[in-house]
Image (tube, grey):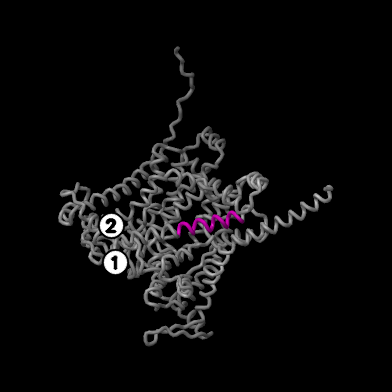
Amino acid sequence: MNIKKPFTLSKKKSKFNGFTVFLFVVLSIYALVLIALLVWGLLSSFKTDLFFTKHSLFEWPNPFKFDNYINVFTKFTYAKTDFIEMLGNSIFYAVGCAVFATLIPCVTAYVCARFKFKFLKVYYVIVIVAMVIPIVGSLPSEIKMAQMFGLYGNLWGIWIMKANFLGLYFLIFYSTFKNLPETYNEAAKIDGANNWNIMVKVMMPLARNTFVTVFLLQFINFWNDYQTPLIYAGTHPTLSFGVYLVLQYGGPTCGLLSGPPSLMSLTVVALLPPLVLFLIFHKRLMSNLTVGGIK
Amino acid sequence: MTAVGEKINKGIGGLANRKGDLIFCLALLLWPTIQFAIFYVGVNFNSILLCFQKIEFVDGVNVSSWGLENFATNFKDAFTFMAGSLFGSQLRLSLLFWILGLIVGTSLGMMFSYFIYKKLRGYSFFRTILFLPSIISITVVIVLYKTFININIGPAMGYPSGITDEPSLMVPQLIFFTLWFSFGTSVLMYSNAMCNISTEVVEAAELDGATGFKEFWHISLPGVYSTFCVFFVSSVAGICTNQHNVWTFYGTEAPEQVQTIGYYIFQQSHMVSESGQGKYTMLAAFGIILTLIAVPLTLGARKLLERIGPSST
């Protein structure tokens, strides 16, 4: 049976015009620059120093060597901390901080959103005020307080310092819990659940997506952070800290060769975990982030 | 049981429930409250107390003394530093980063958001690319960028030792890097805000013959005004604290011409943590003076934006 196309007076209007074509070109250049940098870094990491001195652009490595990566895993050392220890420090620091920095604002936001006591509004106001009012130069004081409480020089000390409810994620969790219907609470209470059971078995599972997204973002943020471990736990270097050290002082200070290929292999190893997480969870990270946008 | 008895029971049960809820809330808020009291209130209070201290490194030991005289000395040192050429240069660079970030970075970010919001060809790919610098460590990006331009572009431009260490190019390349890699979550936030714009308004504009740029200027921009306000206020608050990647590029001994206020504070704090020395009492006074300047600026910016912004109707 032949189905005729409906008659239309005008053609479907193209979304592309001068302005959007300009944006497309700029975005394409941006994407090209970023991807080119990453590809260049990857290609360079497989080159020998000798080959790199004559072929430092996008030439295919010849010979194609894994030696730089072997050196990263076996020879990379700073202050008697080898690569495996640094990797362990990174995981310890990032996971611990991400857990506390996600759980505390989540629980605080739950209490503020689901209970009707007047004093709970104070916590919400504190979060807003802390975001708006800039406090400059408190870092020396924070270092002194960390030393006073015995938190200085330990990665777990940083967990405690990061376990606060301040910041944007409190507002995201607050919004999530505020939008959950009261009927869930009432149904659970009728079934005899107490506040703890309601929170853990009813409400938290409903906020699971937001929790996981925030946790992933916090993990990536702490994995990439080198300045906090630099200041508070310099004797427990993380992988990001190691990359910074090689950038500033050169490969030989950390047991690597002096040429750029060594540095590139270290950066590829350092960037892999957050990149892999992003590739696996990119839809969740970007879609939930847009849902949690600021009003 | 009578109806009154049931009501009384419900009342008593209600009271017991409220008491149980209160205990539950207090128990869960115990740690966040203590942590806030120590590491926010306590830290900032300690910052004020540091202004009354003088710490001298004598025979390998830090010796501290307290007094109003020290308070005056610390603030005098801070004001003296602020009157000097180094602070002037740091302030100028911090303001330059802020202005360029606002004019170039925010404008481009909003335009990119518009592209993603309109779901034009390749929007999903570009959205992922724009978000990538938020995922990859900035240290890694700087390593790649710095090594590439110093080895490949510097010699081609006649700078054999590289671009990032060339005095005349240090600041321009730093500005370029900071602007180029500053997109990320802000683009996603803006595009999300644009999704809340009524489709009828957009269709009406199209019927009236509005071009892409006119739709962006007259409809999309007012639609994301509240999101813009949040980022603008945060950027004003960050003028004195944002390092703009100077530490990662240049480490502990950055040349004076690339130092920002945020870098200087971090540099001095690092000296405190490394060696126990450093001008941290002067730094505490310096931080308080900057806070007293930044707070009214931030609140004033917020008020101004509320006043000049489009109406919600």
Q: Which residue lies furthest to the top in this view?
A: A1
Q: In this rendering, do the residues under marks 2 and 1 share a single chain?
A: yes
Task: Identify the residue shown where x is 54% and y is 52%.
Answer: A172
Amino acid at circle 2: Leu
Amino acid at circle 1: Tyr
Q: In front here: A14 or B134?
A: B134
Whether residue B239 is visible to the viewer of this picture, yes or no, is yes
Q: Circle 2: is it few (<14), some (14-19), or many (20+) Cα within 10 Å? A: many
Tell me the residue that label 2 is attached to: A266
Dot 1: chain letter: A
Indicate the position of residue A15 as horizontal and vertical percent values.
44, 34
Tell me the residue that label 1 is attached to: A78
Instruction: Name the element at disc 2.
Output: helix
Instruction: Name the element at disc 1.
Output: strand
Instruction: Answer above or below: position of A155 versus A267.
Output: below
Q: Does the magenta stretch include residue A98?
A: yes
Indicate the position of residue B115 as horizontal and vertical percent values.
44, 41
Question: Is A117 situated left or right of A105 in this image?
Answer: right
- Sequence-first tag of 2 and 1: 1
Q: Which mark is residue B226?
A: none
Question: Is A16 situated left or right of B143 in this image?
Answer: right
Task: Identify the residue shown where x is 56% and y is 68%.
Answer: B37
